[in-house]
Amino acid sequence: MENLQPVPGHLEPVPGTRSIFDAALVLASSEIGEAIRRRSEEFISAGRSGKERLFTELCFCILTANTSAEMGIRTIEAVGYHNLVSASETELRNLLKGSRYRFYNLRARFIVSSRWIIDDLPGLVKSRDHFGSREYLVDNVMGLGYKEASHFLRNVGVFDFAILDKHILKLITREFRMPSVKPTSRKRYLEIESLFVDRSRQLGFEPGILDLYLWYMATGKILK
């Protein structure tokens, strides 16, 4: 995974630019832009993978919720892809616990209870109705809210949505002079996302790609 240095001013626009969105345009012409373009190609390639690989990406997003991308990556590497697909709930819980994952009981249950969707994932990813695919995931998969479903779809090449995690929310609430608030309801999530999507399109970015630029500004990293 890419782990590059933060832009100057950590959580602030690049010096000489007016906003975080101007900063994203500057970064797009830099080595950061090249790294993000490579990462987006990896996402598109992942979306063409088999159903079990797609399921491991879904598990990554379940495991990342309320933890971190780094924790999700480390946990999946420790547990092993095959165990996400085939281990019993007890076995998976013990593997998660052994890897020092915090929510081992709950997330083991979420993952095992979600295996029914494995056969459906290729069709959901390939569907032209991206909004419908996200709604289906949120409504039917335990452990997935709008942020997690958007994260999964972005990581398999669907770039239509914003992943409103704490880093992105901090940046955009400051940019739009909004009160700091967690999007705890569907309505609120979609309202904030709409601002993000409109601005990304004005700039010529796909929302899921602009998200990577802002996440880099906030963390100095390009993960997934």
Image (cartoon, grey):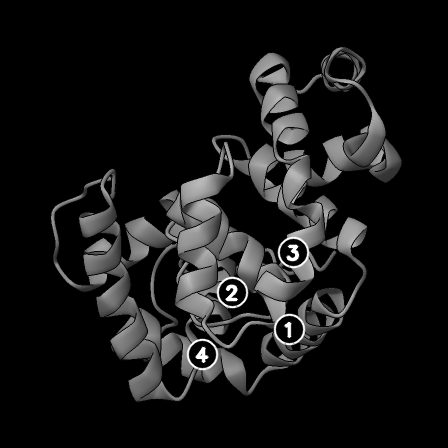
Question: Gap in Å between the C-alphas at discs 2 and 4?
Answer: 10 Å
* Residue 34 placement: quadrant: bottom right
* Disc 3, SS: helix
Residue at the spot of label 3: 121
Q: Which mark is residue 206?
A: 4
Residue 138: image x %, image y %?
42, 45
Task: Estimate the spatial distance between the alpha carbons at disc 1 and disc 4, rounded to whole Å.
Answer: 11 Å
Disc on the earlier residue, 1 or 2: 1
Front: mark 1 or 3: 3
Asked which secondary structure carries label 2, the reply is helix
Residue visible at 73% across and 45% down in the picture: 56
Distance, label 3 to label 4, CA atoms, is: 22 Å
In the rendered structure, which amino acid carries the disc numbered 2?
Leu
> Which mark's residue is nearer the viewer, 3 or 4?
3
Report crowding for label 4: few under 14, some 14 to 19, many 20 or more residues within 10 A (C-alpha): some
Quadrant of the image for the C terminus? bottom right
The circle drawn on residue 40 is: 1
Q: Eyeballing the image, is 197 above or below 179?
A: below
Q: Position of residue 95 (x, y in %)?
A: 80, 17
**Horizontal and vertical percent position of residue 62:** 57, 36
Give neighbour class at mark 2: few <14, some 14-19, many 20+ (Cα, 10 Å): many
Q: State which tag comes first along the sequence, 2 or 3.
A: 3
Give the mark nearest the N terminus, 1 or 4.
1
